[in-house]
Image (cartoon, rainbow, N blue to C red):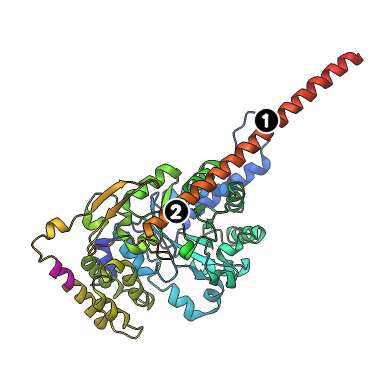
Amino acid sequence: MSLQENNAKIVEVPPLQPNQSPIQNQALEQQQKQDNELTTSTPSTNSTTTIPPNITLGRQLYTSLSSPKKILAPMVDASELAWRIISRKYGAELAYTPMIHSRLFTSDQKYRDQHFGPQDGQPGLDRPLIVQFCANDPEVLVKAARYVAGRCDAVDINLGCPQGIARKGHYGAFLMDEWELVGKLIRAVRDHVPEVPITAKIRVFDDWEKSLKYARMCLDSGAQFLCVHGRTREMKGQKTGFANWKLVRYLRENLPEGTVFISNGNILYPDDVQRCLTEVGCDAVMSAEGNLCNPGVFWDKTDDVEKQFPRVDVFTREYFEIAKVCEGGESKRCFKGHLFKALKTFFEQFGDIRKNLGKINRNATWGEIEKIVIRIEEAVKELYQKDDIKQLDVVKVGELEEWGGRYREVPFWRLQPFFRKVDGVDGKDVIKAAMKDVKEKNLAQEQEKEGRNEEEIAGGKRKADDDVEEGAAKKVAV
């Protein structure tokens, strides 16, 4: 069975045309019309605020994609074609490619074919799709965007990668202090590749007002979607911490009305998606780490445990059947890494299978890889022969936690979030400490804001008193 035929059964995504020209032409006409209105209209005291053209275009694009609520994040070596397809099966409604290096993409044919092959962005198979590039040169980014024009629904600029490689390469979150360059990157695609919508994914500063100004700058430059990861550049690895939803909501509430706003961070379980939509007030929720551990994190259509916490044997077989018919080598190259991540809890009980998986190299055949899949299936089959399996195979929901959600106790033979230990401290305790840190920072911001408000009120009162004194002086002079 071909990937196209296989995918037709498992991916509930309406096929899109490979060329977006009808929608985009309409959008461009609307932009030109609004640009003319902005330059020719006469201000009126009773006129309403004009919505920026890119905000209108972004809302039109979002609607044309069926207003997706659950979004697969761009992840290096992780959000490749096969993983995008399996994630859509488990509820993702929009997916991003892994971050692609714009300079290598435009200068190296082999790199380009490897990271964006003939099936990537294929209608009915891999849409809706946003292609993400890292860049620090507007001309190079424009050239990269032109390569994928007509084969995706938008191009995104990575402004959030906090890793050392991004620092060395001068891209991602290490452009957060170079606003002029960030603006040039966004405007370059907007102005020179208008047929490809441009979006941006950013991180935040600890300073709420600075974060808001940065977000506004990205929108003012032409970004049609804005995805905000509620962590700072320093929050990575063992210092990942807790995404600040209050800060993200503050941005959402103070950006232009109609902005397509995506929140990224803190998604552990399926019900966290709706909780984020409600607490942040965003249009959509993006997940990276949560999805890598369990694509079922996006499943909210039903309470079906087989979808929300799929069995490792069933999921591994599904993923294998998809990956082996994906063209190119990326889906095969990433297969091993995905199993290590998604089956981490399972492998703690079956170290022999993990060891055998570790022996698989890039030259392994699909037949050799399938032996690992079969071993996983056999191990779970043995577990289900236990007399008390019905009592054991239950997902238990915990008490409401301070961070707003509930932990689950999930059998090790089902996909689930993994809580890494930090310096020997249990992962859940790490989350508690991170939540405390976020609360302290939020309190400091609120106190600072109250202080500014008091100063403004006091300043206004002093000005009013001065005006009264000045008026009295004038009367005396008369």
Of badges 1 and 2, the one in the foreground is 2
Percent position of residue 63, x then y: 42, 48
Judge the density around disc 2: few (<14), some (14-19), many (≥20) Cα neighbours within 10 Å: some
Percent position of residue 59, x then y: 48, 47
As rendered, which of 197 and 407 lies closer to the eye? 407
Left or right of 46: which side holds 435?
Answer: left
Q: Secondary structure at mark 1?
A: helix
Q: Residue furthest front?
A: 424
Give me the C-alpha separation between circle 1 and circle 2.
36 Å
Q: Which residue is mark 2?
A: 433
Q: Secondary structure at mark 2?
A: helix
Q: Is residue 80 above or below residue 214?
A: below
Q: Which residue is mark 1?
A: 457
Q: Amino acid at mark 2?
A: Ala
Q: Amino acid at mark 1?
A: Ile
Q: Quadrant of residue 422?
A: bottom left
Percent position of residue 432, x then y: 41, 52
Q: Is residue 468 above or below residue 165?
A: above
**Does residue 380 show up magenta in the picture?**
yes
As rendered, which of 181 and 31 lies closer to the eye? 181
Q: Residue furthest left?
A: 387
Q: Specify the quadrant that holds the C terminus.
A: top right
Judge the density around disc 1: few (<14), some (14-19), many (≥20) Cα neighbours within 10 Å: few
- Asked whether residue 119 is in view, the answer is yes
Magenta span covers which residues?
Answer: 379-383
Left or right of 440: which side holds 322?
Answer: left
Percent position of residue 454, x then y: 65, 33
